[in-house]
Image (tube, rainbow, N blue to C red):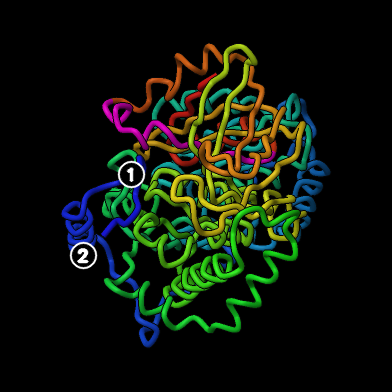
């Protein structure tokens, strides 16, 4: 069942069969092509609630400021593309309830503080309906209710605060609020066995906590789809990979064609099941028939989170980040912490080329053979030196790990050298020693003993620490800074 597996041999044959039996009893089963599937996420509604009445006194926002905020909301709606605001004013609980009903049961709330006591009179209704909310407060002129937000957080409310003079933060708030309803509409196609913390692969807990549905690939369906891949299409795709590569080091053309066929099979499975993400725990058993790493790389670049090694923690993290920022993440192994260089190493074989989204630039790459199995075709991606990175992962469905770094080296592995996963980046961090001894930040618990629960992190171009704090508040997570 697991031909040629090395140290990554994730389970024995009996374990693999048991994993699939588990999937059959706990997961929804993916659709056959003839069966209807749900539509992909589209526009989401956000209730933009002006809390209180505008005022020209020092304890309220003047009408002109509120009108400017409404104008900025219209601009944000256009920029974000998948958000629709339901804008209204509420000075008391009854008016708030009517506006929430108009927005619909799934709409999170963007509350704009207009006057003193405005928030305190309307937010209890928002919390009673268990809606996540972002509070936007203009310093000095927006009243004093902003100081209530920390107390609401202590009470367990899913609320975050944008205390800002920049109206552009209304768009930032909306970009994060939309994550909640988008998750509720999402399905993730999975192929057990899973890795990571146990809650993230428990279909009932994931559905209850995030609203995401885990859907198992039907038994034998991957083989059927792979056998049906059009040969000419796979060869044309392989030629594209070869043409764009800086160099083809070890793979033969037939290896690249097989990898392209595997990628086409994954895309067909995603299309026929109408899912928004993919998590595969059976990669190693699939490798002899075609390495899926190129397929994972392209899916992530297209905005479809795809996680290997069965890491459910990471695929859910990648889905959250995709909805919030429209960025691909590089899921990698923590290859080491170098205290001498104050650096962190991350590596894997399925790195995305387009880290800045589907319309962004493509990173240069080599085509290499898999380092452990010494066959197939995988990308060695050379990421941008000097680029700021955010490393993150949600664990146990309750904590979000995060630290930042800057790329200082992207090693190009010499031909014939088999030293680990092909794509590697080295990032300077604030304090490598702290990272080494604070790995997991105490959030992993007993799962810290599990190799893969502890091992993986997902890297993103940019520093998202502040936004991840807001996201953690909205999703009811604890933000854990590892450095």
Horizontal side of residue 188 vs 356, given as left or right: left
Label tally: 2
Q: Nearer the viewer, mark 1 or mark 2?
A: 1
Q: Quadrant of residue 386?
A: top right
State which region is magenta: 446-461
In the rendered image, the quadrant that contains the N terminus is bottom left
For label 1, the SS is loop
User: Which of 252 and 36 lies nearest the eye of the viewer?
Assistant: 252
**Sequence-earlier tag: 1 or 2:** 2
Which residue is labeled 2 in the image?
A: 24
Q: Residue 167 location in percent, x, y? A: 77, 41
Residue located 48% across and 68% down the image: 262
Q: Is residue 465 magenta?
A: no
User: Which of 90 and 180 lies nearest the eye of the viewer?
Assistant: 180
For label 2, the SS is helix
Horizontal side of residue 77 vs 421, given as left or right: right
Residue located 64% across and 24% down the image: 144
Label 1, label 2: how many angstroms apart (C-alpha)? 17 Å
The dot on residue 195 is 1
The dot on residue 336 is none
**Label 1 neighbourhood size at 10 Å, few (<14), some (14-19), many (20+)?**
many
Horizontal side of residue 144 vs 284, given as left or right: right
User: Which of 73 and 202 lies nearest the eye of the viewer?
Assistant: 202
In the rendered image, the quadrant that contains the C terminus is top right
């Amino acid at each position: 069942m697991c031909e040629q597996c090395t140290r990554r041999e994730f389970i024995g044959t009996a374990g693999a069969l048991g994993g699939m039996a588990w999937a059959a009893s706990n997961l929804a089963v993916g659709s056959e092509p003839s069966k209807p599937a749900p539509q992909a996420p589209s526009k989401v509604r956000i209730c933009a609630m002006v809390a209180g009445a505008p005022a020209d006194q020092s304890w309220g926002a003047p009408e002109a400021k509120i009108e400017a905020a409404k104008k900025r909301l219209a601009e944000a709606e256009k920029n974000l593309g998948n958000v629709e605001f339901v804008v209204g004013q509420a000075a008391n609980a009854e008016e708030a309830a009517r506006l929430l009903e108009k927005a619909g049961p799934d709409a999170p709330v963007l509350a704009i503080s207009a006057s003193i006591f405005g928030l305190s009179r309307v937010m209890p209704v928002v919390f009673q309906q268990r809606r996540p909310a972002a509070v936007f407060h203009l310093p000095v002129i927006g009243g004093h209710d902003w100081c209530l937000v920390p107390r609401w957080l202590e009470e367990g409310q899913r609320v975050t605060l944008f205390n800002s003079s920049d109206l552009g933060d209304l768009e930032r708030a909306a970009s994060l609020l939309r994550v909640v309803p988008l998750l509720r509409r999402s399905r993730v196609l999975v192929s057990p066995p899973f890795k990571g913390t146990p809650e993230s692969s428990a279909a009932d807990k994931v559905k209850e906590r995030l609203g995401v549905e885990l859907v198992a690939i039907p038994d034998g369906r991957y083989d059927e789809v792979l056998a049906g891949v059009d040969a000419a299409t796979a060869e044309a795709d392989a030629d594209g990979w070869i043409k764009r590569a800086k160099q083809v080091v070890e793979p033969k053309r037939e290896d690249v064609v097989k990898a392209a066929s595997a990628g086409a099979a994954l895309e067909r499975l995603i299309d026929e099941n109408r899912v928004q993400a993919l998590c595969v725990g059976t990669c190693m058993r699939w490798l002899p028939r075609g390495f899926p790493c190129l397929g994972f790389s392209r899916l992530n670049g297209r905005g479809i989170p795809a996680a290997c090694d069965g890491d459910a923690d990471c695929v859910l993290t990648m889905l959250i980040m995709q909805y919030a920022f429209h960025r691909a993440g590089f899921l990698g192994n923590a290859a080491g912490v170098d205290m001498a260089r104050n650096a962190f190493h991350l590596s894997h074989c399925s790195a995305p080329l387009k880290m800045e989204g589907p319309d962004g630039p493509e990173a240069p790459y080599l085509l290499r053979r898999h380092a452990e199995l010494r066959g197939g075709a995988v990308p060695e991606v050379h990421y941008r030196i000097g680029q700021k990175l955010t490393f993150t992962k949600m664990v146990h469905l309750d904590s979000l790990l995060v630290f930042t770094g800057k790329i200082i080296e992207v090693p190009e592995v010499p031909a014939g050298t088999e030293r680990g996963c092909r794509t590697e980046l080295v990032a300077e961090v604030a304090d490598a020693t702290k990272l080494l001894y604070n790995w997991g930040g105490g959030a992993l618990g007993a799962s810290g003993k599990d190799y893969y629960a502890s091992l993986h992190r997902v890297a993103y171009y940019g520093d998202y620490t502040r936004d991840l704090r807001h996201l953690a508040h909205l999703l009811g997570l604890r933000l854990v800074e590892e450095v």
